[in-house]
Structures are given as structure tokens and as C-alpha cells.
Amino acid sequence: MIPAALIDAAGRPYRAAGRFAWHFALGKLRHDPFFAHILANGLIPDGARILDLGSGQGLLAAWLLGAHAWHRDNAAAWPAHWSAPPAVRSIHGIEMTPRDVERARIALRAYRAQVSLICDDIRRVPFPQADVVVACDVLHYIDADAQEAVLRRVRESLAPDGVLLLRVSDAAAGWRAGLDRAVDFGMQVARSGRTNALTCRSEPAWLALLDALHFQVTLVPMGHGAHDANRLLIARPSA
């Protein structure tokens, strides 16, 4: 279980960005298993240069930096079965929704030395070199050709011992996949006003695509209840 005080600490900077930003941050950090999983399993190493694709309002940065600070002062309360939180080198976020970028910049202004946030399109903007690339619930907002092109560029930008943390929905997961699509489409409309169709793949299709791009993949179910269609693909460059 995630300590409530850790969630509060990581979400606190969003108070400055408004009630929506603050409550959205607390809700995501409390209920989305992705955030707990990456910390509990030590998926991000110390000194990592992180590229966050579709970074939204910067929750990944707030979570990692907030967790590191909270652990420093509350080590005895850190979950015993979790890895210690990483001390990351830098986090570069790319997000195309201006309001989200503005909320992120307000909330994370104390971390400007480590965090850079730009408003741009991951289909076109250059990617910096990275040790960890995170693409959580973002690739289904672009078409199939663009998905492959983005992942190819991710492969080129990753350090040889780097890792891609890619969360997707399994399009073959029946009604749960349909619910995921409905929720994500609704979030797209609410946060950006865009009504683009979603492009989803089945679990085997995602794995085949990553294999073709020379990734070795570990698959982790990443949802519960109605969201059992979610998958975390931990992809590392192969020879």
C-alpha cells in the first residue's frame, strides 16, 4: 500500500496550479498502479535521464522527485518491500496540451534545475538521449504509422542499457478494452478538446512491433477490475 503521506507530499505542489490540477494529481497517484509499480520494483535507476512522452501535468516528475525527498525524511515509513526511490539526473517532458504544460510548470517550478517541460508533438519534436523513456497511456492517441515512427525514434534515443516503460491497453481484452477506450477518449476531450479517434493494438501486436524494433520485452498486467486491459511493457534494447 502506498503511504498516504507520500501521495500528499508528491501532490502538494499542484495546489499552486489550481484545484483541478491538485485533485487530479492526488487521484492519479492514489489509484493508478503505474506510479507505485515503478517505485516498488526499482524500474528507474539512480542518475537516470528520463524522457516522458505525453507528460501531461508532470505527474511522473512530481512523483519521482517528491518520493526521493519524502524518503530522505521518512525512511522508516517507506514500504519495506519497495526499492529505495531513485535520485534522477533529469526529466524532460513533452506534452501537446498547453493547459497541462502550464499546470506542470507552475507545480514543478521548484525543480527547474532537473525538470524541463515543453509543449510540442511527440510525432515531430526531436528526442534527447535518455536512459529511461516513459510513454504511459499516450501512443493510442496517434495513428499506427506514427506509433511505429515514435517507437523507432525512442529506440534510437535510448542508451544501450536503457529501458522503455510503455503502458498500453490490450485491444483484444473484450469489454474492458472498450471501457479503457471510452475513458481515454473522454479524458482527451475534457483536457484538450480534441476528438481524435484512438488507435489501439492487441497485446500480441504490441509485442510484435517491439520485437521488430529490436526490443526485449517483459509484460506486466497493469490494471485491476474494469481496467484489466492495461499492460506495462518493460522494453530494453536487444543486440
Image: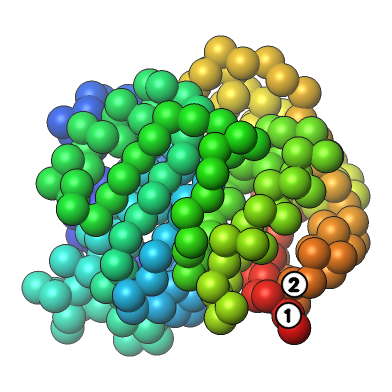
Residue nearest the observer in this picture, 74 or 121: 121
How packed mark 2 is, by other alpha carbons closer than 10 Å (few <14, some 14-19, many 20 or more), is: many
Marks 1/2: CA–CA distance: 5 Å
Q: Eyeballing the image, is 19 above or below 42?
A: above
Which residue is drawn at the image coordinates 48% and 61% (left, top)? 129
Amino acid identity at mark 2: Phe
Helix, strand or loop at disc 2?
strand
Quadrant containing the C terminus is bottom right
Left or right: residue 15 versus residue 36 is left
Which residue in the protein does label 2 denote? Answer: 215
Quarter of the image holding residue 5? bottom left
Amino acid identity at mark 1: Ser
**Image position, residue 122 (x, y; %):** 58, 38
Left or right: residue 56 versus residue 197 is left
Helix, strand or loop at disc 1?
loop
**Image position, residue 24 (x, y; %):** 38, 35
Q: Eyeballing the image, is 214 above or below 176?
A: below
Left or right: residue 210 versus residue 77 is right
Which residue is drawn at the image coordinates 76% and 30% (left, top)? 198
From where the camera sits, is residue 4 visible?
A: no
How packed mark 1 is, by other alpha carbons closer than 10 Å (few <14, some 14-19, many 20 or more), is: few
Q: Which mark is residue 136?
A: none
Q: How many marks?
A: 2
Which residue in the protein does label 1 denote? Answer: 238
Which residue is drawn at the image coordinates 79% and 33% (left, top)? 143
**Image position, residue 42 (x, y; %):** 44, 79
**Image position, residue 19 (x, y; %):** 25, 25
- Asked whether the beta carbons under mark 1 and mark 2 sit within 8 Å of each other, the answer is yes
Residue nearest the observer in this picture, 158 or 70: 158
